Amino acid sequence: MPELPEVETIKRVIEPQIRNLTMEQITVNRPEIIAHLGADEFCQRLTGQVIDHMERKGKYLIIVLKSNDRILLHLRMTGCLLVTPPDCPAEKHTHLVVRMSNDCELRFSDTRRFGRFWLITSGEEDTYSSIKKLGVEPLSADFSMEYLYDKLGMRKKAIKECLMEQTIIAGIGNIYSDEILFTARIHPARPANSLTCEEWGSLAGLIPQCLSFFIQANEISAEEYLRTKGQEYRNTPFLQVYGHEGEPCPSCGTLLRSMVIGGRSSTFCPCCQNEI
């Protein structure tokens, strides 16, 4: 599933290509991807509207219209957003196509069909998506050691699970929780309430630092993004531990191990990230 760095990358690639354009025609090939208002009303309401800008909240993309209507999109596992020329062959699982006023097309494809759109009209309270339940943005000024400790300091749950709780920190998933904990030299299975003040301070600094690093590492041009169908940047070569089980630790050479924590696989170095 795309996490905060990938979703931010998509926003940065897509936004300049659709800003200030009019949505002239919307085609929904699979109505179930429209979670609110319903596919027909979704298309009718959006036709003729002008895009103002895009935002990101956690793993959500938000397209803000000049009318102040908002389109929310969660990519889930395999969702992909592309801006293409009209004659570009469509991906096999293309579920939504928006023809823009410059004749380009904004296309959403999703092999596993879990991705969802919500259209929240101007002045309407969003009680449909889960975006209001999200915790603090880790790249915002509201993110701090004090916030982390207040929310997680007394928890007995493994710190790996805590970092992935979207109601606490928005946007961190399996990939970057591994990378953050490796950088902080904290074992992923340690109970959150076992962390020292120094370790909470380290996490508070390293979380935005790591996420910002990977946003930069994922940087890609619009041309390359389209050429690779929005996929190539996701498996960045800069990952130190995620997906590298059985390989030497990049810091000490010990073979990296993997264990299941909260139903998710977690890769770590048994030497650098001592469980004690």
Image (tube, rainbow, N blue to C red):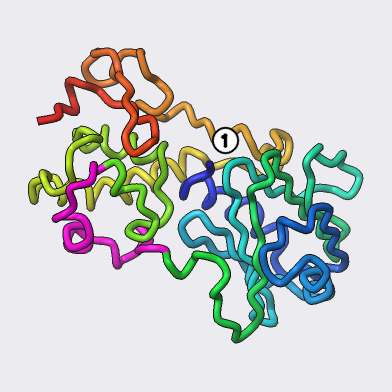
Screen quadrant of the C terminus = top left
Instruction: Judge by depth and name the residue closer to the eye, 192 or 140.
Output: 192
- Percent position (x, y) of residue 215? 46, 45
Q: Quadrant of residue 264?
A: top left
Q: Residue furthest right?
A: 87
Q: Residue furthest bottom?
A: 123
Relative to 89, 164 lies left or right = left
Q: Quadrant of residue 16?
A: bottom right
Q: Residue at x 46, y 50 (%)?
A: 4
Q: Which residues are magenta?
A: 134-159
Answer whether residue 251 is magenta in the image: no
- Percent position (x, y) of residue 214? 43, 41
Q: Residue at x 36, y 48 (%)?
A: 164
Relative to 149, 112 lies left or right = right
Relative to 189, 60 lies left or right = right
- Percent position (x, y) of residue 253? 25, 13
Q: Is residue 47 above or below residue 206?
A: below
Q: Residue at x 53, y 41 (%)?
A: 1
Image mark count: 1
Name the amino acid, label 1.
Answer: Tyr
Q: Residue at x 13, y 45 (%)?
A: 199
Answer whether residue 150 is magenta in the image: yes
Relative to 252, 139 lies left or right = right
Answer few, some or many: residues within 10 Å of disc 1's Cα (few below 14, many 20 plus, some between 14 and 19).
some
Name the main secondary structure of what is drawn in magenta: loop
Q: Secondary structure at mark 1?
A: helix
Instruction: Judge by depth and name the residue closer to the eye, 87 or 148.
Output: 148
Which residue carries the number 1 mark? 233
Q: Is residue 19 above or below residue 259?
A: below
Q: Quadrant of residue 170?
A: bottom left
- Percent position (x, y) of residue 72? 61, 64
Q: Is residue 55 above or below residue 256?
A: below
